[in-house]
Image (cartoon, rainbow, N blue to C red):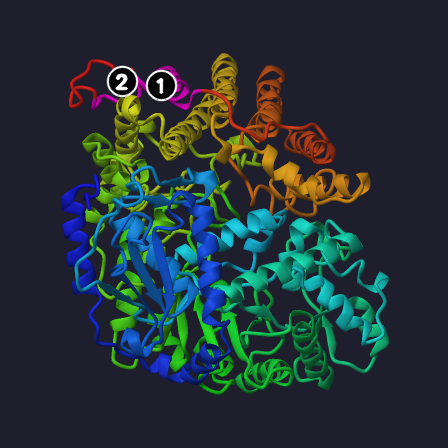
């Protein structure tokens, strides 16, 4: 057979890595031994091999229909894998003539088979698989059928060093999945399986289950109208942070979401996944207190509302030690079993997620934990509690005695903790491996689905290995991706998904060189140089700060400009401070400064290289996505500096300077919107249209669109002159949102700046707030439509914006290194 056109050096390196990094010998950790009984039970209860193979073949047909007959799939036992889960890639011995299947991929489950398929396409054919919004798939590098690359005659075995690859955050269901239909869910489940994900959350449709459960406790449907949040805010009503906001939820929504959940679970089970179902956390409707007046039900404190507005805040929590808690917990588990017909025995419950317990006595906390678990176990005797570890980072309440009390309240092996932010703040180190409790090393990475080029690739490539090999009694049982929002920074998720199969640390320099070749389907040395710059800058954040995007455009400062302190030096001088590795000081104490951890001059060099390579790569959708994202990233940081120049002019009483620079800022926002409009991955339209598509009538369309618009702007409760405490938390760099909302908002602020200087008065902060909030309220209720498909030439627009705003910012250009006098 002819060999692949993919670089021979890549193939050689890959084979070397596979055989060195994945030996046949299987090693187990203490944590894996704790959960071994659960793993054995799940193996016995998995879908029949024929069903898993059929489901895997369905993924292949959707991914690569031209090669649906080129691969043979088979389920094998763990014993054939050396005692653990694995996949094996072999040349198909039956491949003798045209039409025969060329490559045989075997695995313990359908997920393992598809992970093996992805591994083969990635490492032997140079392909790349990403979300559609972030560039989609690059499969044109895959040779035609009958010419697929052969592997070593002995085949290639890839074992999982630990059993689980976890996926999702409790709030991903709202920030990303809120408006998904089955078509979109099917694509995501395909993507999960190809990435090797076998432990996903399955939270869709639970409100319909709760409706049926609470009916058994004498609550009517109307009693729950004030309990569930709106479709875009269900994640926080589930966690007891808020109630009623954006609701009430129509019965049509409840019914369709339950049907959708059944399809999701069926496909996950068919592929051999272990979906994680929700459990009762103690969050109850207000009406339950009336029905059961003697029950221990307390009202929680305010959660980010203006003036502690009880219409939305201060939810009710049933004490876990009350007998009613176990009754409701049992009823919920049993109702799910009745609806779905089966379970994987793992249940997520986050009772104290951003809700502090009333008493810090370790004995009390231990009794709470035991009671919570009893509620699960009474409904499923094989239940295992999966808990996000975010509470231990978020709330100083959780000191070692309290943390130990909760973790040790459940028998060993019956509780698994997600080390949720391990790539930045790993808790396994400070907590002595969660005091002996099994845990999953997770990358959080993204908050609220914000669009920002950001990552910690070195920590991803080494952190899971360090945790697993830290000592012989490691209790690590998996790796995971626990982002709040997806469809951004595909390089981060490409590497993180691989870590489920690596036993040794990944050398990121070599990996990143091959990443660009796979992503664009060809080797372009200058684009590899650009990606090496990005690896050492935007994807090498080591300052430990939370990356919550607060760029001025998308999170405009709500502050009197007189109190903003201006740093010494301009745009390019700031970077020198960063490039020396020093920690960035607060630009101002009066608003949350944008996070800047890298040299923007270096990232501008990467952009120049991207532009130089446009002639070779502009036909690649993944290149166009990356080009738009990188240009947006650079211009966003430039806008932050431009804003400070406006403030500096204001503080110098320079009305002409404020006017001139304000117009430049507003023009820049318009221009970035034009750039974002070039690619489907940066559009507001699909978010709004998908919300309206799920509605059954005009009133539901209005409600769902209000939910969608509110989540990405004010987010939560506000008054006429007090903005939400969570304003801009879900901000997005989306075309339509910049032109239609962010620009008018900035224009209002600049109007008040100029008015202050012209009239010689103080800045009218309350006046600015009233007009901004009115703009927001009006925009959230508006119904104007936005494009759902990208339009425009990304390369030409990026070049134009570079020349317009950035060409004279840098002293040194890489054009000389590229052999040209101009980027264009």
- Asked which secondary structure carries label 2, the reply is loop
Residue at image position (27%, 55%) is 95
Number of callouts in the render? 2
In this view of the protein, which residue sits in the foreground, 654 or 368? 368
Numbered label attached to residue 585: none
Residue designated by label 1: 799
Q: Which residues are magenta?
A: 793-814
Residue at image point 51% right, 23% down: 791
Residue 500 appears at what percent x and percent y? 34, 63
Q: Position of residue 120 (x, y in %)?
A: 29, 53
Residue at 29% from the left image edge and 79% from the top image edge: 28
Q: Is residue 361 above or below residue 155?
A: below
- In-image side of 437 versus 170 (left or right): left
Query: Residue 249 placed where, x, y %?
Result: 76, 53
How far apart are the two marked residues, 1 and 2, measured between alpha carbons?
8 Å
Q: Is residue 311 left or right of residue 650?
A: right
Q: Quadrant of residue 72?
A: bottom left
Q: Is residue 465 left or right of residue 449?
A: left
Q: Secondary structure at mark 1?
A: helix
Q: Are marks 1 and 2 in contact (CB under 8 Å)?
A: yes
Placement of 546 over or under 728, stated as above or below: below
On screen, residue 550 versus residue 780, left or right, reads left
Q: Residue 343: x percent and y percent?
A: 58, 74
Residue 823, which numbered label? Answer: 2
The answer to which of marks 1 and 2 sits earlier in the sequence is: 1
Residue at the far front in the pictured view: 97
Q: Determine if residue 272 is in view.
A: no
Q: Can the viewer see residue 654? A: yes
Asked if residue 799 is among those painted magenta in the image, a careful observer would answer: yes
* Residue 431 vs residue 448, the one in the foreground: 448
Q: Residues within 10 Å of mark 1 (few under 14, many from 20)?
A: many
């Amino acid at each position: 057979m002819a060999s692949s056109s993919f670089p021979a050096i890549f193939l050689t390196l890959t084979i070397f890595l596979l055989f060195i990094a994945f030996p046949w010998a299987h090693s187990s950790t203490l944590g894996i031994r704790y959960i071994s009984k659960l793993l054995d039970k799940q193996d016995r209860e998995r879908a029949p091999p024929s069903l898993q193979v059929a489901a895997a073949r369905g993924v292949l047909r959707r991914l690569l229909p031209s090669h649906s007959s080129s691969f043979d799939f088979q389920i094998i036992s763990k014993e054939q894998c050396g005692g653990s889960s694995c996949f094996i890639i072999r040349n198909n011995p039956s491949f003798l003539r045209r039409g025969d299947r060329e490559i045989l991929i075997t695995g313990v489950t359908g997920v393992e088979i598809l992970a093996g398929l992805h591994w083969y396409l990635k490492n032997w054919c140079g392909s790349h698989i990403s979300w559609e919004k972030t560039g989609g798939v690059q499969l044109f590098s895959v040779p035609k059928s009958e010419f697929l690359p052969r592997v070593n005659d002995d085949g290639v075995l890839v074992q999982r060093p630990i059993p689980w690859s976890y996926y999702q955050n409790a709030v991903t269901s709202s920030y990303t999945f809120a408006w998904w239909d089955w078509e979109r869910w099917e694509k995501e489940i395909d993507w999960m399986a190809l990435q090797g994900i076998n432990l996903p959350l399955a939270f869709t449709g639970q409100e319909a289950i709760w409706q049926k459960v609470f009916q058994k406790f004498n609550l009517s449907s109307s009693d729950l109208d004030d309990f569930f949040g709106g479709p875009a805010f269900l994640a926080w009503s589930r966690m007891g942070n808020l109630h009623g906001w954006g609701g009430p939820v129509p019965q049509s929504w409840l019914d369709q979401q339950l049907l959708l959940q059944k399809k999701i679970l069926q496909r996950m089970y068919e592929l051999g996944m272990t979906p994680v179902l929700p459990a009762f956390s103690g969050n109850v409707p207000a009406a339950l207190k009336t029905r059961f007046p003697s029950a221990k039900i307390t009202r929680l404190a305010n959660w980010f509302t203006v003036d502690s507005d009880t219409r939305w805040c201060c939810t009710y929590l049933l004490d876990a030690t009350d007998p009613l808690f176990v009754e409701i917990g049992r009823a919920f588990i049993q109702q799910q079993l009745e609806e779905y017909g089966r379970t994987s025995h793992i249940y997520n419950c986050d009772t104290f997620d951003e809700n502090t317990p009333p008493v810090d006595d370790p004995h009390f906390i231990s009794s709470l934990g035991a009671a919570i678990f009893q509620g699960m176990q009474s409904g499923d005797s094989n239940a295992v509690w999966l808990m996000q570890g975010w509470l231990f980072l978020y709330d100083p309440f959780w000191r070692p005695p309290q943390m130990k009390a909760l973790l040790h309240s459940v028998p060993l092996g019956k509780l698994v903790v997600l080390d949720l932010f391990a790539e930045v703040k790993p808790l396994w180190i400070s907590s002595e491996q969660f005091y002996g409790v099994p845990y999953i090393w997770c990358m959080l990475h993204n908050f609220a689905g914000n669009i920002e080029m950001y990552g910690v690739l070195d920590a991803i490539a080494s952190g899971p290995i360090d945790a697993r090999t830290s000592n012989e009694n490691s209790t690590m049982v998996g790796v995971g991706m626990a982002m709040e929002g997806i469809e951004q920074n595909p390089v981060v998720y490409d590497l993180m998904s691989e870590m489920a199969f690596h036993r040794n640390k990944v050398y990121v320099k070599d990996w990143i060189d091959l990443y660009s070749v796979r992503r664009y389907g060809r080797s372009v040395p200058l684009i590899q140089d650009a990606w090496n710059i990005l690896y050492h800058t935007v994807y090498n954040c080591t300052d430990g700060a939370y990356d919550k995007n607060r760029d001025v455009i998308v999170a405009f400062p709500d502050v009197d400009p007189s109190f903003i302190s201006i740093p010494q030096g301009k745009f390019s001088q700031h970077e020198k401070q960063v490039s020396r590795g020093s920690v960035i000081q607060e630009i101002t104490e009066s608003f949350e400064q944008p996070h800047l951890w890298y040299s923007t001059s270096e990232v501008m060099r990467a952009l120049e290289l991207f532009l130089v390579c446009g002639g070779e790569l502009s036909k690649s959708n993944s290149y166009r996505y990356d080009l738009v994202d990188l240009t947006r990233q650079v211009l966003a940081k430039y806008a932050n500096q431009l804003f400070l120049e406006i403030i500096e002019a204001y503080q110098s009483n320079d009305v002409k300077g404020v006017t001139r620079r304000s117009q430049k800022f507003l023009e820049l926002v318009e221009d970035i919107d034009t750039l974002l409009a070039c690619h489907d991955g940066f559009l507001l339209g699909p978010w709004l249209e998908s919300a309206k598509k799920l509605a059954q009538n005009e009133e539901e369309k209005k409600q769902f669109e209000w939910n969608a618009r509110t989540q990405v702007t004010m987010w939560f409760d506000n008054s006429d002159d007090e903005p939400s405490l969570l304003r801009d938390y879900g901000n997005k760099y989306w075309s339509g949102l910049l032109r239609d909302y962010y620009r008018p908002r900035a224009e209002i602020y600049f109007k008040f700046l100029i008015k202050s200087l012209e009239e010689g008065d103080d800045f009218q902060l309350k006046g600015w707030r009233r007009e901004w909030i009115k703009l927001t309220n009006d925009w959230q209720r508006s119904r104007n439509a936005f494009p759902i498909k990208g339009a425009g030439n990304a390369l030409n627009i990026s070049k134009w914006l570079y020349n317009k705003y950035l060409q004279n910012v840098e002293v040194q250009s890489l054009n000389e290194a590229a052999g040209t006098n101009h980027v264009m």
